Image: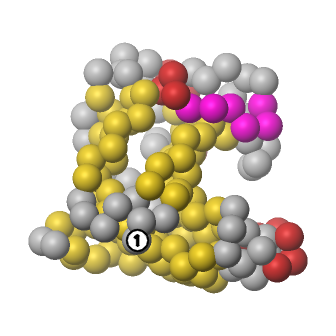
C-alpha cells in the first residue's frame, strides 16, 4: 500500500546543534523523489539532519496492524542512515523504533519488517496499529548526507 507523505526537514539545531541541510523534490534517474542533503556536525552536542513525515492528519495514528513492514525506494551516496518510526504511544521526541540501512548509489527497494525495528529510549512495545511518523535520519558521525526516497509502502 503506497503512502503519500508530506516530508519536512528537521535538524539538530532544535537542540543547539549546528548541522545544516534541506529537503527538496528532485528527479533522479527518471524517478521523482524527495531528497535530503546536508552536512552532519557533532559540534554543540549535535549530530543529525532528518526528513520526516506524519502518516495521519494532525499527528494521529495510522493503523498499519495488518501489515508486516515498510518498504522504501531509496538512492543515496553509500552512507548509512536510520529509518525511524514513531507511534502514538511514544511521548518524548527522542523515543523511536529504529533500523539502519545503507543508501546505495543506484535505486533499490529496501524492506524492513516491523519486527526488525529496535526500540530507542522506550520500553513501550512497538504497535503498528498506532503508527504516527516516519523519518529518514543522517546521524552519528560527521559526513555529507545525500539520500532520496521515491516511494514508501506498507507490505503484507
Residue 147 shows in this picture: yes
Q: x, y percentage for residue 86? A: 60, 39
Residue at image coords 35%, 37%: 111
Could you classify mark 1 by the number of other residues whose Cα lies within 10 Å: few (under 14), some (14-19), or many (20 or more)?
Answer: some
Residue numbers of the magenta segment: 117-122
Quadrant where the N terminus sits is: top left
Of 103 and 63, the residue lying toward us? 103
User: Per the image, is 106 magenta?
Assistant: no
Residue at image coords 61%, 69%: 49
Residue 60 shows in this picture: no
68 on left or right of 59:
left
Where 88 sits versus 25, above or below?
Answer: above
Res 34 → quadrant:
bottom left
Quick one: which residue is furthest to the top in this view?
A: 66
The residue identified by callout 1 is 77
Secondary structure found at label 1? loop
Q: x, y percentage for residue 128? A: 51, 24
Where 113 sits versus 150, above or below?
Answer: above
Residue at image coords 40%, 71%: 77
Of 36 and 7, the residue lying toward us? 36
User: Per the image, is 121 magenta?
Assistant: yes
Residue at image coords 48%, 77%: 37
Q: x, y percentage for residue 120? A: 73, 38
Of 65 and 19, the residue lying toward us? 19
20 on left or right of 25:
right
Amino acid at each position: 500500500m503506497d503512502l503519500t507523505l508530506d516530508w519536512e526537514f528537521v535538524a539538530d539545531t532544535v537542540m543547539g546543534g549546528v548541522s545544516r541541510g534541506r529537503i527538496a523534490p528532485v528527479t533522479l534517474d527518471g524517478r521523482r523523489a524527495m531528497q535530503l542533503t546536508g552536512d552532519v556536525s557533532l559540534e554543540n552536542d549535535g549530530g543529525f539532519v532528518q526528513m520526516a513525515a506524519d502518516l495521519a492528519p494532525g499527528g494521529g495514528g495510522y493503523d498499519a496492524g495488518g501489515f508486516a513492514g515498510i518498504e522504501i525506494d531509496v538512492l543515496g551516496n553509500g552512507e548509512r542512515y536510520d529509518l525511524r518510526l514513531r507511534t502514538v504511544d511514544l511521548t518524548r521526541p527522542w523515543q523511536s523504533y529504529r533500523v539502519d540501512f545503507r543508501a546505495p548509489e543506484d535505486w533499490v527497494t529496501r524492506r524492513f519488517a516491523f519486527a526488525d525495528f529496535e526500540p530507542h529510549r522506550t520500553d513501550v512495545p512497538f504497535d503498528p496499529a498506532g503508527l504516527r511518523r516516519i523519518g529518514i535520519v543522517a546521524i552519528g558521525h560527521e559526513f555529507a548526507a545525500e539520500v532520496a526516497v521515491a516511494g514508501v509502502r506498507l507490505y503484507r
